[in-house]
């Protein structure tokens, strides 16, 4: 968990803005490259919106639907949601420790590796290859064992599964509101939960494939240090902040997507 200003501009900013004007939250956002992360997630969202157009609107969404998707996945919205989660869950000490970790050489390496891997996963061929690598890796492999420890320490599988299920439910709520039709919330929730194990299996394959690709350049000691940070008070608080920030963001995004699909369907029926 991906810009640069021209040197002259950067120098000018530092000359006229006091150093204390940048908060620890600002420093953390910069160290974790949240602007770059938002850029990547926006690109993913635009691709996802195009797939919704193909699958649910038979490719008839047109420029208007594409514009709605673009507005839903605004980069500023993404950054704001992540920062909001951090502001709530990171106290001064945790914030300071998190800034120190991600400003370090290892922290910067981790962020760069994660963002590079996330960009690479835009190519389905690369994602498939990463999943296959994970599936072919022997259980005694030391790196795989480290990944297992990291994933368990951060509860990444269950947190992502719960987030996916909740997002699906919010998509349904948006679709239902847009259609103005009677809702069967319990029936839809039951249908969504039926797919929980399939979502868990897919999430696990994706996570291991992604992290195996992202973290493979790290040494064994660097990976151990990454795990160690995730177990600190600051690491636990950051994990909570990120999941709550992203869950809130994607629940609203999913609702907005459902609403957009319903309105697009109504427009095509007119």
Image (tube, rainbow, N blue to C red):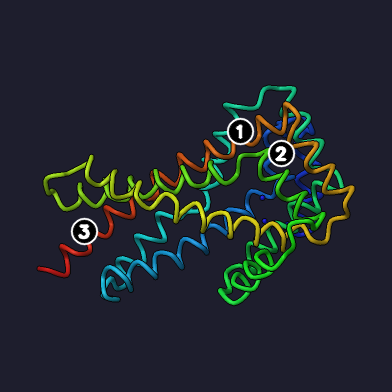
Decide which of tag 2 and tag 1 comes sooner along the chain.
2
Tag 3 residue: 263
Mark pair 1, 3: CA separation? 34 Å
Residue depicted at 73% across the width and 43% down the height: 149
Q: Is 18 displayed left or right of 158 in the figure?
A: right
Residue 262 occupies which quadrant of the picture?
A: bottom left
Contact between marks 1 and 3 (CB within 8 A): the answer is: no
Q: Earlier in the sequence, mark 2 or mark 3?
A: 2
Query: Which of disc 3 and disc 1 is earlier in sequence?
Result: 1
Residue 58 in percent (x, y) is at: 26, 75
User: CA gap, disc 2 to disc 1?
Assistant: 9 Å
Number of the label disc, if any, that sits on residue 86: 1
Q: Which residue is under mark 2?
A: 28
At 84% from the left edge and 44% from the top edge, which residue is drawn? 224
Quarter of the rendering containing residue 113:
bottom right
The residues bearing labels 2 and 3 have C-alpha atoms spaced at a distance of 39 Å
Q: Decide: is 66 above or below 2.
A: below
Q: Position of residue 151 (x, y in %)?
A: 67, 45
Quarter of the figure with the C terminus = bottom left
SS for dot 2: helix
Q: Residue at x 31, y 65 (%)?
A: 65
Q: Are marks 2 and 3 in contact (CB under 8 Å)?
A: no
Mark 1 surroundings within 10 Å by alpha-carbon count, few (fewer than 14), some (14 through 19), many (20 or more): many
Counting from the top left corner in percent of width and height, residue 238 is at 66, 34
The residue lying toward the viewer, choosing from 255 and 24, is 255
Q: Position of residue 170 (x, y in %)?
A: 33, 45
Tell which of 162 and 244 is nearer to you.
162
Q: Are marks 2 and 1 in contact (CB under 8 Å)?
A: yes
């Amino acid at each position: 968990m991906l810009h640069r200003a021209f040197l002259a501009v950067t120098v000018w900013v530092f000359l006229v803005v006091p150093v204390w004007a940048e908060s620890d939250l600002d420093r953390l956002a910069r160290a974790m490259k949240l602007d770059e992360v938002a850029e990547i997630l926006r690109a993913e969202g635009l691709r996802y919106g195009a797939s919704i157009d193909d699958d649910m609107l038979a490719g008839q969404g047109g420029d208007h639907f594409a514009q709605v998707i673009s507005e839903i996945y605004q980069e500023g919205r993404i950054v704001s949601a992540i920062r909001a989660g951090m502001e709530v869950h990171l106290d001064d000490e945790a914030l300071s420790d998190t800034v120190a970790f991600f400003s370090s050489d290892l922290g910067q390496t981790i962020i760069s590796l994660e963002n590079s891997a996330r960009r690479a996963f835009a190519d389905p061929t690369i994602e498939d290859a990463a999943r296959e690598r994970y599936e072919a890796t022997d259980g005694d492999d030391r790196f795989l064992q480290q990944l297992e420890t990291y994933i368990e320490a951060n509860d990444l599988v269950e947190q992502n599964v719960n987030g996916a299920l909740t997002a699906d439910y919010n998509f349904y709520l948006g679709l239902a509101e847009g259609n103005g039709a009677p809702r069967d919330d319990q029936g839809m929730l039951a249908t969504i939960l039926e797919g929980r194990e399939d979502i868990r299996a897919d999430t696990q394959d994706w996570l291991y494939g992604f992290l195996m690709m992202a973290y493979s350049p790290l040494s064994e000691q660097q990976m151990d240090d990454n795990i160690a940070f995730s177990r600190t008070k600051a690491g636990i608080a950051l994990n909570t902040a990120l999941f709550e920030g992203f869950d809130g963001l994607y629940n609203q995004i999913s609702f907005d997507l459902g609403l957009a699909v319903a309105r697009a369907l109504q427009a095509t029926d007119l």
